[in-house]
Amino acid sequence: MNTFVSAIIVAAGNSTRMGLGKSKQFIELCGEPVIKHTLRAFENCEVINSVVIVCREQDENEIKEIIKSAKFSKVKAVVYGGETRDISVKNGVQACDERTTHFAIHDGARPLVSNKDIKAVVEEAVKCKAAALGTLVTDTIKVVDENNNIISTPDRSALRAVQTPQVFEKDLYLKALKEGSNKGITDDCQLVESIGESVKIVIGSEKNIKLTKKFDIPIAERLME
């Protein structure tokens, strides 16, 4: 089967936890905005054929200017996000090239993702229909009740911290969008899991952090350097 992988870069959040009064996509890391680093990773990855960016309406012009100045040729569309992540991703899916065989869904605020990891997770998804990057959990995790009392300690050898990209065969993901439950969804694997399908974890790099709070910025810069 000839594969055609469309990356959907989700960059439509309000960035409220960052507390900077602007989208975290435009925070500068080593002199360039976060979204530029993220897009460059997918632009330079040979297994990615096309890119769609999902953003806030007020960020559209600035993102388009970044695409133009950097000459990112794989970016085919910039579309608006919705009130929830699943709506944003759905908007991105609808803008993908008709030749698409697989969707690679990635957080715009993960600018340190490597070419190697993108390629590895895409290749795994081509083999098994659904795959996501993840890392081993080194901390001891506790499950607590509503009063914050510990009720159990899961075996951390069976735990993974899930990252993006998360890559899915097109027909499988469209089925999950139609039949799956998006209640309380925090990532796209959950949507696929909700229709009874399994997702393979590909162990990736711990450097592939998501920028969520202010203290993530200097950490990302050090890792990038």
Image: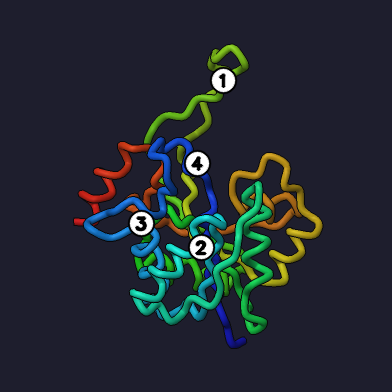
At 59% from the left and 87% from the top, the residue drawn is 2
- Between discs 2 and 3, the one toward the N terminus: 3
Q: Residues within 10 Å of mark 3 (few under 14, many from 20)?
A: many
Where does label 4 land, which residue? Answer: 159
- Between discs 4 and 1, the one toward the N terminus: 1
Foreground mark, 4 or 1? Answer: 1
Q: Quadrant of the C terminus?
A: bottom left
Q: Find the distance from the CA under tag 3 to the CA under tag 1.
A: 35 Å
Amino acid type, residue under disc 3 in the picture: Val
- Between discs 4 and 2, the one toward the N terminus: 2
Where does label 3 land, which residue? Answer: 34
**Residue 41 visible somewhere in the drawing:** yes
Where does label 1 land, which residue? Answer: 144
Give the numbered dot on residue 60. 2
Amino acid type, residue under disc 2 in the picture: Glu
Q: Residues within 10 Å of mark 4 (few under 14, many from 20)?
A: some
Foreground mark, 3 or 4? Answer: 3
- Between discs 3 and 4, the one toward the N terminus: 3
